[in-house]
Amino acid sequence: MFLRPLLDLFFPPLCHVCRAYLPPGGAEHGLPRPFICHDCLAKIEFLEAPLCTTCGIPFATEGGASHTCGACLQHPPFHTCRSAAALDGPVRELIHRFKYRDRPHLSEPLGLLAFPRLEIFLKDFAPECVVPVPLHRKRLRQRGYNQSQLIGEVLARTLGAPQQVGNLCRWRWTEPQTGLDAGDRVTNVRGAFGVRDPERLAGKRVLLVDDVLTTGSTMRACVDALREAKVAAVAAVTVARGLQP
């Protein structure tokens, strides 16, 4: 218990975003610190109510009450979804480093940043297992790690729920979704995912984890595969969400 203050004295922690020195401090919300300074935290747009109670998209409502959005009323999805923050500023920078600059250790601050903002939703859903959005084996070889799995590990550990890795899998190669419009994204991932052993998921409440949500086409394709495995319910969470202008 005395080692952490001693290390902070000789090796002061730095903010993962701007590299500024951080003052000594304890846990936040009963969790380890994400090691992001107050100035950088102030630049993050955390997604809060009012929002759609199904897909999690934030929007202005009369009286500030959350409710189901028009799109979800028209086409009710099989799952609910929440994201912790907008994909902008420090969050965008951290995720870019995490995914494209070989910084797998950033899964810890990203997961710890997201959990307090998702905690009520996660505990209300009470998942029985955590399932990360899988990478194709070619992409996994290129990157060396699955960023969704690493974030899933942080959330699974915090929730006390097991993470299933390798059961939900990406059957075929898909082109990167970046740069594709909404229609092409849906076509690109249609039928790309499947479950190897449906019995391990049948009847369970599954938490699906990814780093970023944009149009939601990848999430929906994964949910379709989980639904075929006869899961009881699916909730999806991401660290960040791209908000349409």
Image (spheres, helix red, strand yellow):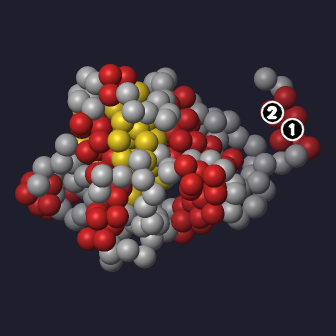
Dot 2: what SS?
Answer: helix
- Where residue 30 appears, x then y in whole percent? 56, 30
User: Residue 4, which numbered label?
Assistant: 2
Q: Residue at x 53, y 42 (%)?
A: 149
Q: Residue at x 56, y 36 (%)?
A: 154
Amino acid type assigned to the residue bearing label 2 in the image? Arg
- Where residue 142 appears, x then y in whole percent? 64, 57
Q: Is residue 122 visible?
A: no
The answer to whether mark 1 and mark 2 are in CB contact below 8 A is: yes
Residue under circle 1?
A: 7
Amino acid type assigned to the residue bearing label 1 in the image? Leu
User: How far apart are labels 1 and 2 at the CA level?
Assistant: 5 Å
User: Residue 28, which numbered label?
Assistant: none
Q: Residue at x 24, y 36 (%)?
A: 228
Dot 1: what SS?
Answer: helix
Residue 58 drawn above or below residue 145: below
Looking at the rendered image, the quarter that the C terminus falls into is bottom left
